[in-house]
Amino acid sequence: MQFIDTHCHLDAAEFGDTQKALVQEALAAGVGTLVIPAVERANFAAVLALCTQHDACAPALGIHPMYTASATPDDLADLEKNIQYNQVIAIGEIGLDFFVEGYDRERQEYYFSAQLKLAQKFNLPVLLHIRKAQDTILKHLRRTPVCGGIAHAFNGSPQQAAEFIRLGFKLGFGGAMTYPRATRLRELAATLPLESIVLETDAPDIPPEFIQRGEPNRPANLPRIAGTLADLRGMPLDEIARITSANARAVLPRLS
């Protein structure tokens, strides 16, 4: 029984230099593959190096919407160069964040649109960051169609879910659904087509309900997170592992 963590920031400062131990712990827990998305040009090299050092890790490169304030056109050129010369499996983490105040929406949309065009050019899927921006993201995806990807930490409506699925996307579910009070999210996890769901930790962020408050999330937590999905759908855990891993490989073909 092997799981795929489709979104894990293994290079995050919270982890210090413990990446080797974290990967070994994840492998021992049954997490066979970890997708490591970059968030800005400054960490492209760190993500690529981690994925060179650990066979279980696969890199995605992109400029996160909350890092666009300091981004420059040179960063886009560097992203394109890295895509050309490295085995990058997706462009990400990219998208829009209209939840946090003080960020320039127009600037976010400029960098998001530019990165969608790179995804088109290189026929790569995208890993989407979406907060309070579902419909605007969908507008951009209809304007600049890509070969699919993952709507990370999905928390939209059933109608928005259907539109992402129509556009070739899988929907990422993680620690947030482990909280009993997250009734709307748990309803989505229980009722959306299972063929459209992938699993993620977003480690060290989005901690699941079962870890100590303040403790960073880790990729080894994924099987317990998956246990919530299995319970919500009334299915065996090994079936959840098999189907969600197949979904991840389908939408991120370079994983195979």
Image (spheres, helix red, strand yellow):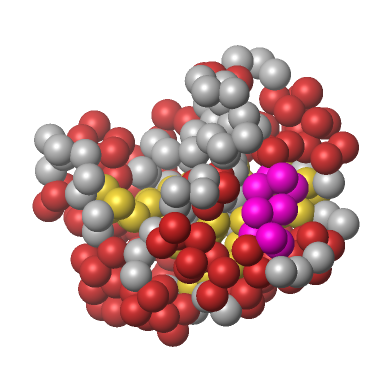
Q: State the residue at coordinates (73%, 28%).
A: 22
Foreground residue, 93 or 27? 27
Which quarter of the rendered picture does the N terminus lie within? bottom right
* Residue 146 quadrant: bottom left
Foreground residue, 209 or 151? 209
Magenta segment's dominant SS is helix
Q: State the residue at coordinates (12%, 52%).
A: 106
Q: Name the outermost residue toward the bottom.
A: 166
**Side of 32 relative to 227 (left or right):** right
Q: State the residue at coordinates (15%, 38%).
A: 101
- Camera sees residue 195: yes
At which x and y percent is residue 251?
60, 70
Foreground residue, 184 or 73? 184
- Camera sees residue 74: no
Which quarter of the rendered picture does the C terminus lie within? bottom right
- 239 lies above or below 133: below
Q: State the residue at coordinates (34%, 55%).
A: 130
Span highlighted in magenta in the image: 222-231
* Residue 250 quadrant: bottom right
**Side of 50 relative to 40 (left or right):** right
* Residue 67 quadrant: top left
- 18 lies above or below 117: above
**Side of 45 relative to 132 (left or right):** right
Foreground residue, 120 or 166? 166
- 40 lies above or below 1: above
At which x and y percent is residue 94?
38, 51
